[in-house]
Amino acid sequence: MSPAEEGRDGGFDLRALLTARGAERYELHARHLNHQLPRMLRTIGFDKVYERAEGAHFWDAEGNDHLDMLAGFGVMGLGRHHPVVRRALHDVLDAQLADLTRFDCQPLPGLLAEKLLSYSPHLDRVFFGNSGTEAVETALKFARYATGRPRVLYCDHAFHGLTAGSLSVNGEGGFRDGFAPLLPDTRVALGDLAALERELKRGDVAAFVVEPIQGKGVLAAPPGFLLAAQELLHRHKALLIADEVQTGLGRTGDFYAYQHEPGVEPDLVCVAKALSGGYVPVGATLGKDWIFKKVYSSMDRVLVHSASFGSNAQAMAAGLAVLSVMEDEHLVARARATGDLLRGRLAAMVDEYELLHEVRGRGLMIGIEFGRPSSLGLRSRWTMLQAARKGLFAQMVVVPLLQRHRILTQVSGDHLEVIKLIPPLVLDEEDVDRFVGAFREVMDDAHGGSALMWDFGRTLVKQAVAAR
């Protein structure tokens, strides 16, 4: 009898449990977890029941196919349930490794570190944790210790995580409110070299942490900014930290987004999300040899920074499988080509629709920004929404994309009229056709004065006013 069969005889049957109680999902969340999540989902009609997923698609309880343009906030880089990653996880479980003994050196972490470092040969060592925010926390700690300085600079509108340290370099006030005091770090505008240099001259800056393309708003660092920032930082003996948690592993058409700018070689790089294969949480902080050797300077300090589940066999196996799939299926090049196709077709609509302001991004990280229309009728409706709460028009687009066209997207941030597209890297041309066609229909409705769409807008206005 296999271990799985023994476990089933012992009384636990996962499939039976889901069959018996899966329909309670929203009630269970409302009762025991974040009660605002089911409330929000019901308000905008997103309270779906999804049963199955594969690649860039998932299916609801009625068997309807949905196109995933969100990829679990970027986690599902390979799409859902890639067979190679699944097989790797089955293999590592069946191997029954002596994992996490804490007093040995297993091969899988070393192999994954070796493979990751091959994509950034100027870096030397890796620390494995369990999430993106943990990867950032590691970089902040290492930078402070290695330089002996207390302060880290970050950008307006940055998102680096929600634990206390990474929250201190989060540039969005909505996430920070009510959690003070945080670490004494300092905000600068993305692209503002003068502000960066001004802060560096104070002599207490350990590092500058930056997303090469910000997730909030899909705003890229201006051309030449990262290289110039790197030169400034090194001149003042400070470090450059690249947060590639969302942009890394092919998302932008390069393995890392910072590689789009020749000569940029960050001292520390943070990755997570897609490295998991969508299965096992994993985060990694890559860095230069001298930084690691300064942190782990003696045997007394061997555990000065560690993670209980860091380097676990399942996460390492998933990461190795992900990198293998990326190479075998040429996903970096595919993301670049498919992203160019999608972005180009959407950008061609800007001149057709006055509510459509700009399409930007790189690879399969695309921002669609809406703006104030010129015609009187549309302008009055736009003004109504803006007076209630900025960002409601983008939400008006997101909702019919899901409800009418079964395409899942997201508004790029609070109070932003921007939709962000971060689909799985396995997106194909047929998926692009489907999204572009659906988006065009929604834009036609908005510009044609569709009563259904603008009535929903008025509902959102009422909800926004009531929430104040």
Image (cartoon, rainbow, N blue to C red):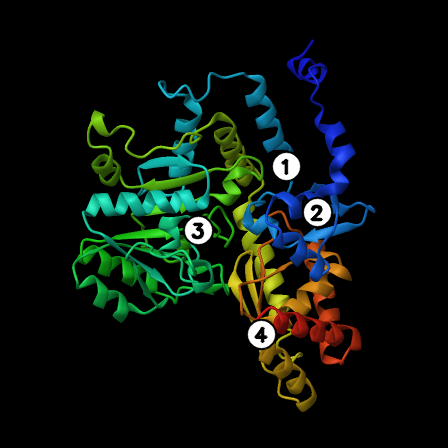
Asked if residue 460 lies left or right of residue 134, the reply is: right
Earlier-in-chain disc, 1 versus 3: 1
| Residue 146 image-quadrant placement | top left
Q: Which mark is residue 19?
A: none
Q: Which residue is mark 1?
A: 82
- Residue 161: give its label: 3
Residue in view at x 54 percent, y 16 percent? 96
Question: Which structural element holds mark 4?
Answer: loop
Q: Earlier in the sequence, mark 1 or mark 4?
A: 1
Residue drawn 16% across and 59% down?
Answer: 203
Residue under pointer 4 = 389
* Front-most of residues 290 and 326: 290
Residue 464: image quadrant is bottom right
Q: Amino acid at mark 2?
A: Tyr
Q: Residue furthest front?
A: 31
Horizontal and vertical percent position of residue 185 = 29, 58
Residue, disc 2: 26
The Cα–Cα distance between marks 4 and 3, rounded to whole angstroms, is 25 Å
Dot placed on the residue nearer the N-terminal end, 3 or 2: 2
